Amino acid sequence: MVLNIRVLTPDRVICSTTADEVVLPGLTGQIGVLDGHAALITALDTGLLRIKLDEKWTPIILCGGLAEIDRNRVTVLVNDVEELVSIQLSDATKELERATLAIENAETSKARLDASIELKKATARLEAINYLS
């Protein structure tokens, strides 16, 4: 058996495919989904969604959202995704360093929150590069 996964934003379908395994960025850590997973609705953090099909991983950077798992169907609803187009490893590493510094230098809780979201995205970009290379 295979999983059916759909990733949706309010205005478009990002992907609709089959998968052998899906790894979601949950609020408390990564959630691995295989065939026969128990029904579940969970909030998602900003981070990396990974879809495995035929031994190949496809990474998608999510900006928060919800996931519903029901009878081998995984539906991911997100506000937005970040397209992965030729990010260079050196660029991604620099972005991660910048985001880390932004958190350290944040003077308000709003600035700290914004910086932590950017740090999560930068970390996800770096992880995604590892799956693409």
Image: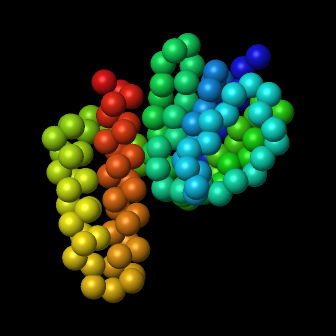
Q: Is residue 44 left or right of residue 116?
A: right
Residue name at image x 67 percent, y 34 percent: 33
Residue name at image x 39 percent, y 83 percent: 109
Q: Is residue 62 left or right of residue 124?
A: right
Residue name at image x 78 percent, y 47 percent: 40
> Picture quarter containing residue 84?
top left
> Picture quarter containing residue 110?
bottom left
Q: Depth check: 43 or 5 in front?
A: 43
Q: How is the image coloured?
A: rainbow
Horizontal and vertical percent for residue 97?
20, 56
In the rendered image, is residue 15 in sight? no
Horizontal and vertical percent for residue 76?
65, 46
Which residue in the rendered view is the most extreme toward the bottom? 108
For the image, the number of numbered tags is 0
Q: Is residue 56 above or below residue 117?
A: above
Q: Is residue 4 above or below residue 44?
A: above
In the rendered image, is residue 53 in sight? yes
Q: Which quarter shows the C terminus?
A: top left
Horizontal and vertical percent for residue 12?
59, 47
Horizontal and vertical percent for residue 78?
59, 54
Residue name at image x 47 percent, y 40 percent: 60
Q: Is residue 124 left or right of residue 1?
A: left
Q: Which quarter shows the N terminus?
A: top right
Q: Depth check: 69 or 8 in front?
A: 69
